[in-house]
Amino acid sequence: MRDEDAGMTKHADTDKQERRAVLRLPGGRTLSLASPLVMGTLNVTPDSFSDGGRYTSRALAIGRALEMEGEGAAIIDVGGESTRPGAIPIEAEEEMRRAVPVVEGIRRASNIPISIDTYHAVTARAALDAGASMVNDISALRSDPAMAPLVAERGVPVVLMHMLGTPRTMQNDPQYDNCVEEIGLFFRDRVAYAAAQGIQETRIILDPGIGFGKRLTDNLEILAHLRKLRAIGFPLMVGASRKRFIAMVHPSGKAPDERLGGSIAAAVAAVMNGADLVRVHDVAQTVEALRVVQAMREAE
């Protein structure tokens, strides 16, 4: 390798490390990624696969957000539309009616960073106006052409997730030749699009989309080979909490909210293989598990 090539490679590696070091929020706030962060899932929907209907009351939803903050969540992710397999889309107006008052209430009660889980730009804008500080877009900016300009304008972090099809169709016989490689190509394409739309690379997070158009083997392959996706150079988020693949690995007939062991195992595996953030329902238990992982790292 020529000296100048080695220098370019070193510079690129440094850039990647800097992008991973912190999550940059609006107003100059940052979240360190030196240790794994836990994003608490708050579904304010009647039909989500695990906790649908549990937090449809604004007061209960805000209370759960504050509880998750107390348990160690670094971010609260508020979603007003179910994206479980087979879910039927709802209008953005209904999504806003469910989610935005909750975002507003959490922000009045706490300074914890809030993520809005939506692929509708109008919902994202309303949530950002109400106090959210990042966008979690399962369509990776493909669903609404107004989303990327909004994210760029507001200077907020955005999660770009991989998914085949839509929630309604994504589990209709998904097929890959090489799942991890294809997700990597998808990420590179979406990062290039985001950058072309004016979104700063320091505000991009990648999510391989466990359970979103994936077979059991695909989900396991993703968890086992996350470092190949981490090498792209952006923070990685993994959301495996309570998902069906856990019941496929360990059939038990348990309800999704009883898949705690598998959920923690998936979160630990994700972090040990390169994830920077995990999106979970069971915050307290996951935080405890990941503190053990971090202590092991620091003891090396």
Image (cartoon, grey):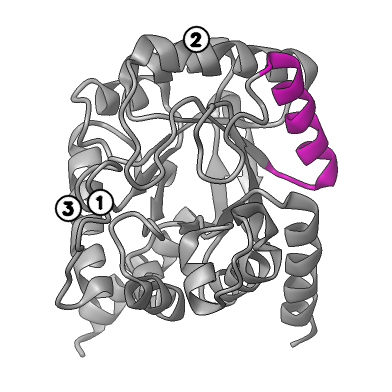
Q: Is residue 183 visible?
A: yes
Q: Nearer the viewer, mark 1 or mark 3?
A: 1
Say left or right for 251 vs 102.
Answer: left
Secondary structure beneath label 3: helix
Would residue 74 appear left or right of 150 to someone viewing this image? Answer: right
Horizontal and vertical percent for residue 44? 58, 26
Q: Which residue is mark 1?
A: 170
* 1 and 2 marks in contact (CB < 8 Å): no
Inter-mark Cα distance, 1 to 2: 26 Å
Quarter of the image for residue 223 reads bottom left
Question: Residue lying furthest front in this view?
Answer: 253
On the image, the x and y values in percent for residue 162 come to 29, 53
Position of 118 relative to 278 (above/below): above
Residue found 81% across the figure and 63% down from its top: 288
Q: In this rendering, does residue 34 appear at all? A: no
Q: Residue 235's x, y, as percent? A: 46, 57
Q: For the point 22% across and 53% down, which residue is it? A: 164
Label 2 is placed on what type of residue?
A: Arg
Q: Which tag, 3 or 2, sits closer to the chain's start?
A: 2
| Label 1 Cα crowd, 10 Å radius (few <14 / some 14-19 / many 20+) | some
Location of mark 2 (residue): 97
Q: Nearer the viewer, residue 12 or 296?
A: 296
Start and end of the magenta stretch? 57-74
Q: Amino acid at mark 1?
A: Met
Say if the magenta span includes residue 93.
Answer: no
User: Which residue has dot 3 on it?
Assistant: 189
137 over 289 or under it: above or below: above
